[in-house]
Image (cartoon, rainbow, N blue to C red):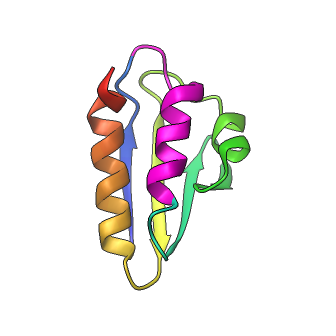
Amino acid sequence: MEKIVSIKNASGLHARPAGMFVKKAAEFKSTVEVVAKGKTVNAKSIMGIMSLGLAQGDELTVVANGEDQESAVNALVELVEGGFGE
């Protein structure tokens, strides 16, 4: 399962929201990946997420495979669309 979402918060996916994203992804049993800018990274890896260097307006695809894939994708998309509470 996958969904495309755009970064809404002005500061992009910097350390704090990246940490929130990784923490949320780690709550799920499914494998979760982020595809952006031609790269695919493990959504449960802070270094992977930070390496994407995503800014406001950038699009990313959240991809999950496993028993709770739908919940994982929806929770992560909701987090991004909510601007990480910023």
- The answer to whether residue 8 is seen in the rendering is yes
What is the chief secondary structure element of the magenta stretch?
Answer: helix
Image position, residue 40 (x, y; %): 66, 55
**Count of residue discs:** 0
> In the shown orientation, is residue 30 left or right of residue 76?
right
Residue 81 picture quarter: top left
Whether 23 is drawn above or below 8: the answer is below
Whether 34 is drawn above or below 82: the answer is below
What quarter of the picture does the C terminus occupy? top left
- 13 in magenta: yes
Whether 65 is drawn above or below 75: the answer is below
Residue in the image at 48% along x and 31% along y = 17
Image position, residue 55 (x, y; %): 52, 23
Residue 8 picture quarter: top left
> In the shown orientation, is residue 53 left or right of residue 27?
right
Residue in the image at 58% along x and 55% along y = 43
Image position, residue 69 (x, y; %): 39, 74
What quarter of the picture does the N terminus occupy? bottom left
Residue nearest the viewer, comparing 65 with 39? 65
Residue furthest to the top in view is 10
What segment is highlighted magenta in the picture?
Answer: 10-25
- The answer to whether residue 13 is seen in the rendering is no
Image position, residue 67 (x, y; %): 40, 85
Residue in the image at 37% along x and 21% along y = 9
Whether 19 is drawn above or below 42: the answer is above
Residue in the image at 46% along x and 82% along y = 66
Residue nearest the viewer, comparing 47 with 57? 47
